[in-house]
Image (cartoon, rainbow, N blue to C red):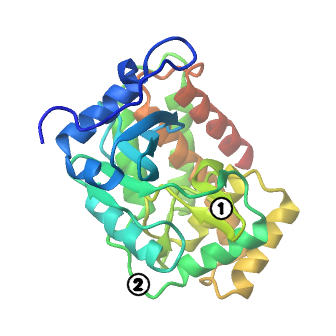
Amino acid sequence: MTGTPIMIASGAPPGGRAPQDCPDAQAVGRAFAKCPDLAGITGGIVSVQRLPGLSNQVFRLTSERGVFVLRLPHAGRPALTDRWAELENLRLAAGIGLTPAPLFADPGRGLLLLPEVAGTPGRPEPAQLGEVLSRLHGARFQFANRRELAPWIARLRALVRARPDPEGLLKRLERLATRVEGKGAAGSSVFVPSHWDIIPGNCLLTPDGPVLIDWEYSAMGPPAWDLSYAVLELDYTAEEERTLLAAYRQTGGAPVGEADVQAMKAVCDVVSALWALGQADAMDPAAPLGRFALHRIERAERLF
């Protein structure tokens, strides 16, 4: 197959440009040209819609054969994940009904095609999420990779340590990272299959309960990570946190104490802020990734 095997319907969207002339459609067209198998799955593309995403380019494709989601990496962003491990982990999670199975993947290019899930991104009911995380953490398989928190924090610190820091964000974050390491909160003796990125955008609310998407950072990890991260990023109240943990334990989740969950919260915010500053073009608290980092720095400072 030659050329770009993507057929964008004619007609201008709001704003006046024909879809085939839009940068998003062009990015999708380049991906289809490099991976002709995509067109064999989707058929002709009718429309392309950009979806939110901080570390990837994500597109909703309406086609002759249905609706799909295409994930492409952002050019120039640090490569922090193992795409081969991601694919294996995604298949394992799909096998127990926690996420849709991939239709096509090219880990070398960071390309992933999935069926669209009929759900709305949002904030799951704590009891439902507790049951989902219990199923994941209690699964009888091992994810393809393992993430120790102390080396992970060291790797993220190395990414940003030498960068200009006009606003002092990194200085504040370095102090927090040192305190996290000093308290030993980044250690764990129990590792379970973990999602690692429980945020509203990665929780699709469906009539059958929440479906988790975006397994890019999935790995074996301490069970307190997913629980603490979910409480922080989903902005659960203290009562909702208790409901989450109760449902998690009642349905057979991994052994994890209340103290472990509380101690992990500052670790979550330090890691999130380091990640964001490593992905950002500049340490600018007014830019999206800078705002993301600043919020988590401030929250970690309050937690300490």
Question: Within the image, what quadrant is residue 176 found in?
Answer: top right
Residue occupying image coordinates x 35% and y 61%: 103
- The residue pinned by badge 2 equals 141
Of residues 112 and 241, the one drawn nearer to the viewer in this rendering: 112
Residue that protrudes farthest toward the right in the picture: 239
Residue that protrudes farthest toward the top in the picture: 16
Residue 259 image position (x, y, % from top left): 70, 71
Q: Nearer the viewer, mark 1 or mark 2?
A: 2
Quadrant (top left/top right/bottom left/bottom right) for the N terminus: top left
Of residues 98 and 22, the one drawn nearer to the viewer in this rendering: 22
Residue occupying image coordinates x 54% and y 84%: 138
Residue 66 image position (x, y, % from top left): 46, 52
Q: In screen coordinates, is 124 left or right of 198?
A: right
Asked if labels 2 and 1 touch by Cβ distance under 8 angstroms, the answer is: no
- The residue pinned by badge 1 equals 228
Please state which amino acid type lies under the numbered disc 2.
Answer: Phe
Number of numbered markers: 2
Residue occupying image coordinates x 58% and y 22%: 285
In the image, residue 294 sits, relative to residue 185, either above or below, namely above
Residue occupying image coordinates x 48% and y 66%: 100
Residue 246 image position (x, y, % from top left): 78, 78
Residue 37 image position (x, y, % from top left): 22, 52
Query: How many C-alpha atoms fall within 10 Å of the one at disc 2: few (<14), some, or many (≥20)?
Result: few
Query: How many C-alpha atoms fall within 10 Å of the one at disc 1: few (<14), some, or many (≥20)?
Result: many
